[in-house]
Image (cartoon, coloured by chain):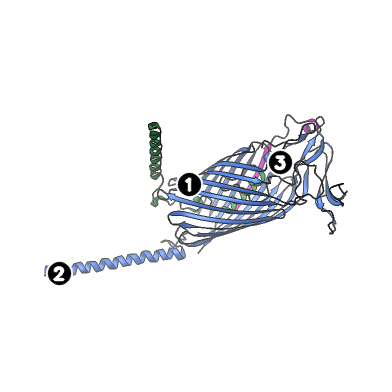
Chain colours: A blue, B green
Amino acid sequence: MQLKKAGRVRRTLSAISATLLVAAASGYESEAAAQDFYGLDKGNNDNFGPGIAYSQLDAALLVYQEAGGRVQAIEPTGSLSVHGARGQVLSIDGVADAVSGATPNGAVPSSVAQNFVTPLKASGSSTTVTSASGGSTVIQLPPTPGQIATAALGRQYTVPANTLPMDRGFRDHRAAMTLGWSQPVGRITEVGASGGFSTEEDYQAITASAHASQNFNGDNTTVSLAVHGEFDTSSPFGGIPTALAAMSGQWKSPTSRQKTQLGLVLGVTQVLTRNWLTVLNYSYDRQKGYETDPYRVISVVDPTSGLPTSTLYESRPGGRQTQSVYWENKIAFGPALTDVSMRYFKDDWGVTSKTVEASERVNLSRHWYVEPDIRWYQQSAANFYHRYLVGNQSLPAFASSDARLENFHALTYGAKIGFRLSGRSEIFVRGEYYAQAGTDHPADAIGQLRQQDLFPETKAVYGFLGYQWKFH
Amino acid sequence: MVARFLKRVLIVSALAAACSGCSAIGPKPWEKDIMARPEMQITPYPLQASADDHIYFSKEAASGGRGFAGGGCGCN
């Protein structure tokens, strides 16, 4: 009897515990379902973490302006990423930009006015030219005996004495799109690939990349490898000039040249403590093909007076290998987040560079945050960088007066103000000032060049307006 | 021969020690509240990061580091 009673009790207890288990299981299930479909946690707050299906839309507008009437750019961008509950991510990015203004053509300033001629219309073309922009004039170019049978039209612009030569006819539009997919595959945390296309009036780029990453140590360590390929076609207005040939308004041949690029990034991300994240990347990149800037020229100067005697198209090596090490740390402390990063870069053109960047985000309230930032950059000159060539010396194989290949340092500083509209969306505005500083008066300058500013440093301000929205 | 073997053993032991050290580093799953904050993600504002990279790629000789060095444009 007792045994019978005990059996009944046991059965009753079993039934109760089974009911509790089912109830608990259904509770977990409904909670999981709520997270899957609505992304809400127990407190009914939005949750966009792993295992939850959601989408993120980013939209932004960049407005960039250089001092001295140089380059200005307006660039709207957008990005949509769709996250699946099993870690799949589909991303679509789009960029459009309009660039215009004046850009240094590479020649040195002179104590006398200088004329420069660039191609405007090929010989034998039938459409008429009514005017040329940016203070230029249209000139008739005579036929070149043995090369060009008929006359062509050129665009001539005059640079006043003691002024940095700049081409004011610079204008371009670009549109680019990238499509990417990533997901976990078997035991590999994430595997992904993306492809992109970018087109400008005189440049096209096709890009493809693939990556894989693996998490270890309770998801505190991530090791990743990414490979990237790029195929670029440069089709400059007026054709491809011959390296170190005299600048002219004649149409040149061939009309385009290509460049290929292959690179990899090996990265380790480590969560060190509850509030400290560190990232270490090594990058290697190899380019082969047309590296020259087809519009850029270099002055040949008189060895005594320093006055320009001729203007040649620049010439760069047909390849480049770069390496960099990048280290970033993010440390949260109360409402503040410190982000400090460093980069060391080196290439086989002789350029080495160091970059240090820091920002401090402070969450002022539930809605508002501010983030001041500063960046310091320094680079050495490429071994074929020459501000000018000297008339009585033989021409080097490669020569470029591009200030981006010169020894200089740069400082950027600014701040960002953000406003979180809800747990799902935020809007922010960011303003930055960028200034380069180089050697304006090198000790070995010749003749009149001693009086000229020989480093055409870039100073720019830019504003960035961004919007981020997460939704289910 | 023996010296080379010992060297290999030492290297493997050092790596194993380093890896076991790694497993002790980092918070437990229930201590990841701060890491889960959106601003703690590696690139929380991708468009802002790509705009910066694009500007610096156009004005300086060095590029990449955070990601690929390529610009996908003719601005350099």
Give the camera-side residue of A279 and B2: B2
Q: Quadrant of residue A23?
A: bottom left
**Residue type beneath disc 3:** Asp
Q: Quadrant of residue B25?
A: top left
Q: Earlier in the sequence, mark 3 or mark 2?
A: 2
Q: Which residues are magenta?
A: A429-449
The residue at the far front in this view is B1
Chain on which label 1 sits: A
Label 3, residues with CA under 10 Å away: few <14, some 14-19, many ≥20: many
Residue A370 place in picture, x, y as percent: 56, 49
Residue A394 place in picture, x, y as percent: 76, 33
Q: At 36% from the left edge and 65% from the top edge, which residue is drawn? A: A27
Q: At 46% from the left edge and 65% from the top edge, which residue is drawn? A: A38
Name the secondary structure under disc 3.
Answer: loop
Instruction: Look at discs 3 and 2 and give the one toward the viewer.
Output: 3
Instruction: Look at discs 2 and 1 and give the one toward the viewer.
Output: 1
**Residue type beneath disc 2:** Lys
Note whether A438 is above or below A138 in the view shown.
above
Residue ID for mark 2: A5
How far apart marks 3 and 2 lie (CA) works out to: 96 Å
Note whether A98 is above or below A28 in the view shown.
above
Residue ID for mark 1: A269
Specify whether residue A302 is painted magenta: no
Name the secondary structure under disc 1.
Answer: strand
